[in-house]
Image (tube, grey):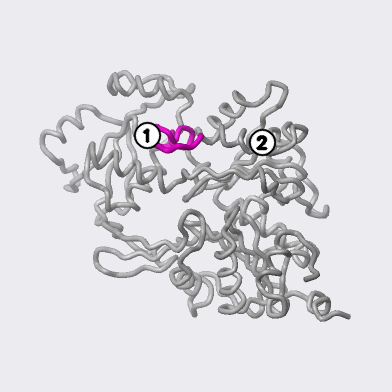
Amino acid sequence: MPRHSKNHDQALPNKTLVLDNGANTIKAGFVGSPSKFEDCQIIPNCLARGRDKKVYVGSELDSCRDFGEMAFRRPVEKGYIVNWEAEKAVWDHSFFAAKSTLPCNPHESNLVLAEAPNTPVTLQINCDQVVFEEYEFASYSRWIGPSLNAYHDIQCLFGAVARKSEVDVVPAECLLVVDSGFSHSTVTPLVNGRPIQQAVRRLDVGGKILTNYLKELVSIRHYNLMNEDHLVNEAKEQVCFVSSDFRRDLESTWKGASESRKQRDGNAEDIVVDYVLPDYNAATKGFMRPHDPSLAARVRKMGAMANPGGIVEDFMTLGNERFSVPELLFNPGDIGMQESGLSETVLQSLSGLPPGLWPAMLGNVLVVGGNALIKGFVERLEAGVRQLAPAECVVRVVRSPDPLKSTWLGGATMAADPTALKAAQVTRQEYQEFGSGWLAKVFSGASRKP
């Protein structure tokens, strides 16, 4: 029997760690039976240094109470791991230290790692070397994140009857995954869980650009927050929404707060709000509240005003910033980017497919990633795609129940099937015999023969 066949017949360890190594956070957890969203932990993927010069690594950031002027060092840039020195520090603290968040013995564990589509080969080789040579995992597989989402019960998300637990888990036959995260947004068509490579499209607009744009706007109009990445990112997550009618909402904010007290999208809600900034003493998080013109006038006159408890509040009044920032996902040209919006990117992706696949793809669009949590995002995407798609195609867009953990849960669902896991994994012995070039063939679905 050939030597590589003997290696492949070896039994894999019972413990499997699934990592969705995002630019902003790592979604990590061990495979359960069955796995649930609650089994996944979200770990900040960064090294951070506060103004007191204290350095926080990964999950240590959760214990920080003063995020003022905090500097971040992120291992992932543009969706790819480019700084393994920083990434290893986060992994060591999270998985391999004495008091780690998820204790893991790599010699007795399988690793399922999600990466961004079209990762450069050099960076993939670096990743393979770290996994097998630095950490010495027993086995390892590298997937593009969108592919793992195909292992969800997709039709159940669209309202069909949930599949039975005893039924073998197989990837969805046709699925179009829109993943809008921290670094970028991608559109990936999948057939039986495999990406159609020539149809994968990328939009270089993600949560990071939205946060930076909001920083610029509030620094010009309110306070200088150019060094307050964490504060502005929290404000973005709380106050921003995607407008269903950008021109209408823009005109209403131009006319003043009194004119914006109207029915928007069928709900009575003011566009203009006040966002109270944290002082990192009594309050570590900011919060949004309805705009009070009289209060704002008094604060502008006095500079600051103590509330009955004696605490001074600083706040900024936000109007069109709330919807003009996430509008970049659909109109990157607003800041001079020569790229199409997300709805157009979906149609560009379909143009790389045979027309016969269009109805199946448009009828099964799954939205994941942190930006999917922005209010109105899914509705705007569905309306934009429906406007551009052929009239005879039914457009159905659904958001994962937890867009942040969706890729992780798809990977955990796949890894819970021993047959599917063994077909995807490469053991450390195989890596030592055939090298990283052979790994690329295996992970692309090619034969295991070198």
Q: Name which residue type carries label 1.
A: Arg
Residue 388 — which label? Answer: none
- Residue 301 on image: x %, y %: 11, 33
156 or 363, which lies in front? Answer: 363
Q: Point out the image quarter for the N terminus.
A: bottom right
Please state which of residues 130 and 319 is positioned toward the viewer in this rendering.
130
Residue 239: quadrant of the picture? top left
Q: Residue at x 45, y 28 (%)?
A: 243
**x 75%, y 59%: residue:** 445
Q: Is residue 118 left or right of residue 326?
A: right
- The three-letter amino acid code for the residue at tag 2 is Leu
Question: What crowding class fits label 1: few (fewer than 14 Cα within 10 Å), some (14-19), or many (20 or more)?
Answer: many
User: Mark 2 to mark 1: distance in Å?
Assistant: 31 Å
Numbered tag placed on residue 322 in the rendering: 1
| Crowd band around label 2 with a 10 angstrom C-alpha radius: few (<14), some (14–19), many (20+) | many
Mark toward the start of the polypeptide (2 vs 1): 1
205 up-or-down from 327: above or below: below
Q: Quadrant of residue 270?
A: top left
Image position, residue 140 (x, y; %): 67, 70
> Which residue is labeled 2 in the image?
350
Q: Residue 102, relative to residue 377: is it above or below?
A: below
Looking at the rendered structure, the secondary structure element under dot 1 is helix
Q: Is residue 385 left or right of residue 424?
A: left
Percent x, y of residue 443: 70, 62
The stretch in magenta equals 323-340
- Secondary structure under badge 2? helix
